[in-house]
Image: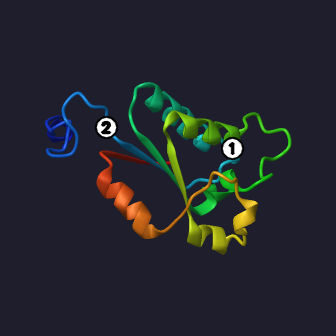
Amino acid sequence: MLSSVKNLPRRIVGRTPAGTPPTVLIVLSHAPFDGDTTWNALRLASTLLDRNSPVRIFVMNDAIDVVRQGAMPEGSEFDLQAMLRALLPRGGRVKICTTCINRCGIGQGEVIPEAILATMADLAAWITESERVLVF
């Protein structure tokens, strides 16, 4: 199986020209302040932007707390919201699941102002438009 994966083309024909960095979608699903998962995902997103790869981040499920205003627990080692916000002026795009916001009882005014509310259709579009999809 591994040998067949190695032989796959590095680019999907018709998507991006050779030599162009791939578009990467990172889906944040894990609780942001429970371990280092979200921190590592945001570090990866920053590194990808350094390499000129277009980066999209879709926040859903338990990760929704990363966009909740004032959700950072006291004593947190990293300000994950600041890390997420720092990606935006560098070209990163962030959308959050509207259903997840509603399910968690978070009002629209309780999320960071940069948050763009989105749907499963938006996520599906991003998946089909991206060359790499990672779930954290």
Q: In the displayed structure, does residue 125 sit left or right of residue 111?
A: left
Q: Is residue 69 left or right of residue 125?
A: right
**Which x, y percent locates residue 126?**
38, 56
Near mark 2 (Cα within 10 A), the count class, few <14, some 14-19 or many ≥20, is: many
Query: Which mark, by number, is residue 22?
Result: 2
The picture places residue 42, in percent across and down from the top left corner, at 56, 38
Front-most of residues 61 and 126 = 126
Residue drawn at (60%, 68%), measured in percent from left and top?
Answer: 100
Secondary structure found at label 1? helix
Which amino acid, mark 2?
Answer: Pro
Q: Is residue 16 above or below residue 133?
A: above
Q: Is residue 75 left or right of residue 32?
A: right
Residue at left offset 63%, top offset 51% = 114
Distance (Cα) linking label 1 and label 2: 25 Å
Asked if residue 27 is positioned above or below residue 8 in the image, the reply reads below
Location of residue 62 by image quarter: bottom right
Q: Amino acid at mark 1?
A: Gln
The answer to whether residue 62 is visible is: yes
Q: Quadrant of residue 101?
A: bottom right
Label 1 sits on residue: 81
Q: Is residue 25 above or below residue 47?
A: below
Percent coordinates x, y for residue 31 in the rendering: 64, 53
